């Protein structure tokens, strides 16, 4: 049964003083502890001071009620683990790369600017390399992703001269030596003297050189094209051909014709020459 506090008032010290002797006085508020620390008083009784209509009274419960305490958290086993973001799909593991699909571009934006051989796509080239080199060591199948083969010579001895082979889902256009796109990056180890480095880099904007690591990187659209371009650069660096032969005879345009890049016999010979050039 609720008590009435019509004859009570609060003091400045936090005490409740009642004129009714049956009610008595309460001291300062007691710190929250066990439910037995509180007097058996229900907060459903009217307060000794009026409540403004602008600040309505919130629902009150007896302090001794178990509902006044928060319920315990569920165990971790029952919590469902959600992905960090739906825009970040999980990367396919290398073991399932043979059967996994990549969401890469399938049509080049520049396909009408020249021979279709020069305008292959990352989607097409990925599955061709999987047949030759096996599953990649790193695969990001989402749009704008990449596939990386580390030390491809361990998977196919014909490509032991490459340190890395990487496909990036992009469509980089270049006019020289023939209009083509680039998305396939191949890396070899080749020390280039600083005295001729500017000439090497001026051959094509697809050529990238890391001076510290002595790594030559070429961007192209096929392994045949990249191997041919790397071979001609390597032979020039080794002094086997001169700068005059390289440009005066328009040698780069001739050796990168589609008929030569599509020839299995010529490409096998070029891989052997490049492997020998990288060792010397």
Image (spheres, grey):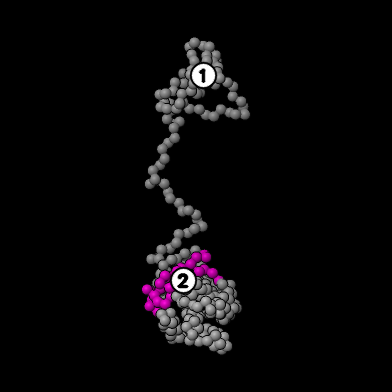
Q: Quadrant of the C terminus?
A: bottom left
**x and y percentages locating residue 78 in the rendered image:** 39, 46
Residue 124 visible in the displayed image = no
State the image quarter where residue 156 is shown: bottom left
Residue bearing the label numbered 2: 213
**x and y percentages locating residue 106 in the rendered image:** 52, 71
Indicate whether 128 appears above or below 49.
Answer: below
Start-end of magenta stretch: 143-171
Q: What's the residue at 49%, 58% (across, down)?
A: 88
How many neighbours does mark 1 have within 10 angstroms: few (below 14), some (14-19), or many (20 or more)? some
Q: Secondary structure at mark 1?
A: loop
Q: Which mark is residue 231?
A: none
Residue bearing the label numbered 1: 15
Q: Earlier in the sequence, mark 1 or mark 2?
A: 1
The foreground one among 97 and 160 is 160
Q: Is residue 157 magenta?
A: yes
**x and y percentages locating residue 22 in the rendered image:** 48, 11
The foreground one among 98 and 227 is 227
Q: Could you tell me how far apart the alpha carbons at marks 1 and 2 are, in whole angstroms?
A: 80 Å
How many neighbours does mark 2 have within 10 angstroms: few (below 14), some (14-19), or many (20 or more)? few
Indicate whether 121 appears above or below 238.
Answer: above
Q: What's the residue at 52%, 86% (across, down)?
A: 242
């Amino acid at each position: 049964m609720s008590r009435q506090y019509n004859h009570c008032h609060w003091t400045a010290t936090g005490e409740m003083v009642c004129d009714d002797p049956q009610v008595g006085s309460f001291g300062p508020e007691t710190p929250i502890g066990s439910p037995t620390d509180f007097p058996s008083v229900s907060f459903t009784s009217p307060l000794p001071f009026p409540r403004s209509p602008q600040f309505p009274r919130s629902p009150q419960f007896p302090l001794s009620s178990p509902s006044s305490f928060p319920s315990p958290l569920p165990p971790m086993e029952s919590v469902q683990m959600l992905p960090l973001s739906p825009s970040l799909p999980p990367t396919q593991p290398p073991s399932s790369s043979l059967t996994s699909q990549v969401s890469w571009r399938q049509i080049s934006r520049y396909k009408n600017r020249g021979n279709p051989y020069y305008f292959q796509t990352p989607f097409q080239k990925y599955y061709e390399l999987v047949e030759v080199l096996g599953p990649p060591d790193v695969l990001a199948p989402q749009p704008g992703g990449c596939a990386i083969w580390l030390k491809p010579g361990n998977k196919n001895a014909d490509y032991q001269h490459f340190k890395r082979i990487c496909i990036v889902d992009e469509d980089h256009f270049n006019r020289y030596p023939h209009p083509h796109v680039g998305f396939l990056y191949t890396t070899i180890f080749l020390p280039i003297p600083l005295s001729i480095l500017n000439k090497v880099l001026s051959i094509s904007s697809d050529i990238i050189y890391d001076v510290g690591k002595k790594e030559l990187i070429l961007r192209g659209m096929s392994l045949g094209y990249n191997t041919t371009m790397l071979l001609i650069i390597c032979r020039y660096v080794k002094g086997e051909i001169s700068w005059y032969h390289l440009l005066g005879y328009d040698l780069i345009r001739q050796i990168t014709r589609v008929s030569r890049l599509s020839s299995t016999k010529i490409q096998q010979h070029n891989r052997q020459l490049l492997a020998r050039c990288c060792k010397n």
